[in-house]
């Protein structure tokens, strides 16, 4: 079986855009949001968050839940887009 591609798909692209939109709407820097995510028990650097926002790093389920908690939204909002709030 060939190795599975780690390319970010359409859902991952939506999550990346939504994280950036919600973060900027809340006036948070990437460092501030990464610190919030870390405070929720999911260690994350601002570099990791930047790579997620630029769709250069996949956002796994644990990242998704922690980022949603830090942004005070449901994980579903990150998957569906900011209009889902």
Image (cartoon, rainbow, N blue to C red):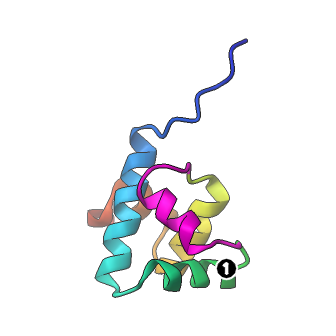
The x, y position of residue 10, in whole percent, is 39, 39
**Residue 57, position as x, y percentages in the image:** 54, 50
- The residue carrying pointer 1 sits among few (fewer than 14), some (14 to 19) or many (20 or more) residues within 10 Å by Cα, namely some
Q: Residue at x 46, y 77 (%)?
A: 30
Which residue is label 1 attached to?
A: 38
Q: Is residue 55 magenta?
A: yes
Secondary element type, mark 1: helix
Residue 60 seen in this snapshot: yes
Residue 16 higher or lower than 11, as above or below: below
**Left or right: where 48 falls relative to 20:** right
> What residue is rendered at 44% in x and 37% in y?
9
At 56% from the left edge and 61% from the top edge, which residue is drawn?
64
Give residue 85's position: percent from left, percent from top.
Answer: 33, 71
Residue 76 appears in the figure = no
Q: Which of 42 and 65 is in front in this view?
A: 42
Q: What stretch is highlighted in magenta?
A: 43-58
């Amino acid at each position: 079986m060939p190795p599975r591609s780690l390319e970010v798909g359409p859902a991952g692209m939506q999550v990346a855009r939504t994280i950036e939109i919600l973060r900027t709407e809340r006036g948070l820097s990437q460092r501030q949001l990464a610190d919030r995510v870390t405070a929720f028990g999911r260690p994350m650097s601002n570099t990791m968050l930047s790579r997620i926002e630029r769709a250069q790093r996949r956002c796994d389920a644990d990242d998704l839940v922690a980022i949603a908690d830090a942004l005070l939204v449901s994980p579903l909002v990150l998957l569906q887009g900011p209009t889902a709030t």
